[in-house]
């Protein structure tokens, strides 16, 4: 298993808000971890949801924020729908930037499968687009959700970020202390190249790199069990991300994962004893080890 992460040597490792200390910590959360990719369509949300469930299965209090304003998929994957009237999400930005937030102004997180979760998809109607065409407002909206949602006191709060390096990533990197990032890639060099750009952005912000998850890594032959490499691989494996980025897990292509996402029952819920669930539990164990959670907090290690 990969060794624990070292902390950044710069002043951004501090959380006292002093000049030069970098972004402050999110109040109440012991660890804030981003799940990111440089390219869409790599299954990042599937990884984020199952990683969150795997960490919760280790006895941790886990929150999951779906930070993709334009394509929120977490509600579908968790089988949750908005009930009642839509929230006035247009008021989130002014509330979040107004200073201290009173308890009565906070939005309740939704409890599902032992997770506390929130998504823009739960704040608008199911057929209503989140029409935010101003990039800085996208960042402020997500930053507002982080501040306004009543997460309780999670041990780990996962941020499922949209692909790329624009917003809301830029605002979050400026305003929220991240304890690490998990990068989701697929085997193709193009996907790795795009993720390499995201990697550079997180490193420039002194965010520790937890490691990479290679999704859609291979296909297991249903007849013989051999690995079939569906996607072309470059001659130098993982050359884009580099040897200093630990490979935390290889997740194969499996129709069960797609079915689980569509039915709102993630594979760790639908088939907890299956091989895919075991892979995500191993991923959660690797992330917990890299974050030093088992040693510091005395949870299942």
Image (cartoon, helix red, strand yellow):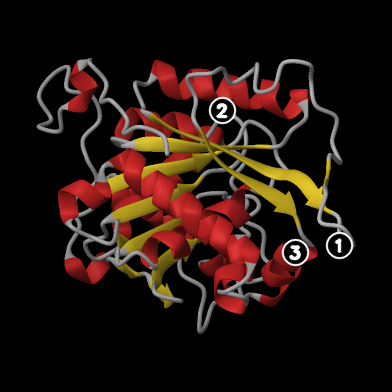
Q: Is residue 143 above or below residue 64?
A: above
From the image, tell me which residue sits under label 1: 222
Instruction: Label 2, secondary structure: give it.
Output: loop
108 to the left or right of 153: right
Q: Residue 257: horizontal and vertical position, in percent?
A: 70, 63
Of label 3 and label 1, which has the lower sequence position?
1
Q: Determine crowd level at label 3: few under 14, some 14-19, many 20+ residues with C-alpha closer than 10 A.
A: some
Closer-to-camera residue (71/30): 30
Which residue: 32% across, 30% down? Answer: 5
Disc 1 + disc 2, Cβ < 8 Å: no
122 to the left or right of 174: right
The C terminus is located in which quarter? bottom left
Closer-to-camera residue (129/122): 122
Q: Determine crowd level at label 1: few under 14, some 14-19, many 20+ residues with C-alpha closer than 10 A.
A: few
What's the distance in space between the residues labelled 3 and 1, CA to CA?
Answer: 17 Å
From the image, tell me which residue sits under label 2: 165
190 to the left or right of 52: right
- Residue 98 visible? The answer is no
Q: Residue 132: horizontal and vertical position, in percent?
A: 59, 46
From the image, tell me which residue sits under label 3: 258
């Amino acid at each position: 298993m990969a060794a624990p992460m070292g902390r950044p040597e710069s002043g951004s490792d501090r959380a006292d808000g002093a000049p030069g200390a970098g972004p402050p910590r999110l109040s109440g959360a012991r660890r804030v971890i981003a799940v990111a990719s440089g390219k869409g369509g790599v299954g990042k949300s599937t990884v984020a949801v199952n990683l969150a469930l795997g960490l919760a299965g280790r006895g941790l209090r886990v929150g999951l924020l779906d930070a993709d304003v334009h394509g929120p998929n977490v509600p579908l994957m968790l089988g949750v729908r908005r009930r009642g009237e839509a929230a006035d999400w247009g008021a989130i930005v002014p509330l979040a930037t107004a200073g201290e937030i009173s308890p009565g102004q906070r939005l309740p997180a939704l409890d599902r499968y032992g997770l506390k979760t929130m998504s823009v998809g739960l704040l608008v109607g199911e057929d209503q687009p989140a029409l935010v065409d101003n990039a800085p407002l996208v960042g402020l909206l997500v930053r507002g959700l982080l501040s306004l949602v009543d997460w309780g006191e999670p041990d780990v709060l996962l941020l499922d970020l949209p692909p790329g390096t624009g917003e809301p990533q830029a605002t979050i990197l400026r305003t929220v202390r991240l304890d690490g990032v998990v990068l989701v890639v697929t085997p193709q060099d193009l996907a790795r190249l795009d993720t390499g750009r995201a990697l550079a952005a997180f490193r420039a912000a002194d965010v520790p790199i937890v490691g990479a998850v290679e999704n859609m890594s291979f296909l297991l032959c249903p007849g013989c069990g051999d690995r079939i490499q569906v996607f072309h691989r470059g001659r130098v494996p993982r050359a884009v991300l580099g040897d200093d980025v630990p490979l935390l897990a290889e997740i194969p292509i499996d129709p069960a994962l797609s079915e689980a996402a569509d039915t709102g029952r993630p594979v760790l819920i639908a088939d907890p004893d299956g091989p895919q669930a075991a892979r995500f539990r191993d991923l959660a164990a690797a992330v917990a080890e890299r974050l030093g959670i088992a040693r510091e907090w005395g949870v299942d290690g």
